[in-house]
Image (cartoon, helix red, strand yellow):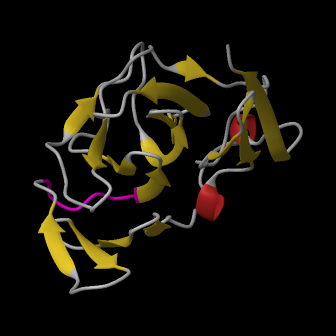
Amino acid sequence: MPTEQLLASGPDVDVVVLRGAPLRVGVVPTSGPSVVYALGVSDFVDVSVAAGERGFLVVGDGPKITNVTAIALDRSGAPAAPEELPPAGDTKVTRFPRAASLGEGWVITYWDGIGPSFVRIDARARETTPPLELRTGDERGGQTEARIAVSRRAIAVTWVVGPPWFGHGVASEIPNRPGPRLAVLTCR
């Protein structure tokens, strides 16, 4: 199973996602008392948090199986209202969302039922571009997460293609070339 990213460190505070309903974050400042904020959503199946220039972003799969919810937090860890990001196209599922900071906004990846998709959002967690499917032509089989690394000139996304989990599936769902994948996107 993919490992969730539940802790992110900013310049002034650390944010940890506290699983359970309702979903909450714990904010631990470098000095002063810690605080806990409810995020206004029920618990997600999978959740992730990232730190950036303007604060933090919590992403989770839900509230429906076909969308991702993004919640921006300011530099002090205080949350804004949740934003549901309905993916475009024929996506039947969104699972394992991951986030990374990109300039004043964010990038998110999620598994869309076939392979990873990638979307940019602004600092307030609103979608700025339609999702982009990342494909190598052999995405079938098991569910995957797609980790993100960002530089000033490129974005690298990596994921693993493998057979369905727990032995489920048929022979046509076993990839021809299982293993790691890498997509490099250039920024303009």
Q: Residue at x 34, y 59 (%)?
A: 45
Q: Considering the image in quadrants, where does the C terminus appear?
A: top right
Residue 6 percent across, percent down from the top left: 43, 69
Residue 13 percent across, percent down from the top left: 37, 71
Instruction: Give the vertical position of 155 relative to 21 (above or below).
Output: above
Q: Residue at x 44, y 14 (%)?
A: 130
Q: Which residues are magenta?
A: 41-47
Q: Considering the image in quadrants, where does the N terminus appear?
A: bottom right
Q: Nearer the viewer, residue 134 or 147?
A: 147
Q: Residue at x 37, y 23 (%)?
A: 87
The residue most toward the front is 31
Residue 44 counted in the magenta span: yes
Task: Answer left or right for 86 relative to 187.
Answer: left
Q: Residue at x 74, y 49 (%)?
A: 162
Residue 122 percent across, percent down from the top left: 37, 27
Q: Is the magenta region chiefly helix, strand or loop?
A: loop
Residue 174 percent across, percent down from the top left: 76, 42
Quarter of the rendering containing residue 100: top right
Q: Nearer the viewer, residue 159 or 27?
A: 27
Instruction: Give the vertical position of 119 relative to 76 (above or below).
Output: above
Quarter of the rendering containing residue 146: top right
The residue most toward the right is 177
Q: Nearer the viewer, residue 39 or 20?
A: 39
Residue 171 counted in the magenta span: no
Task: Answer left or right for 163 relative to 8.
Answer: right
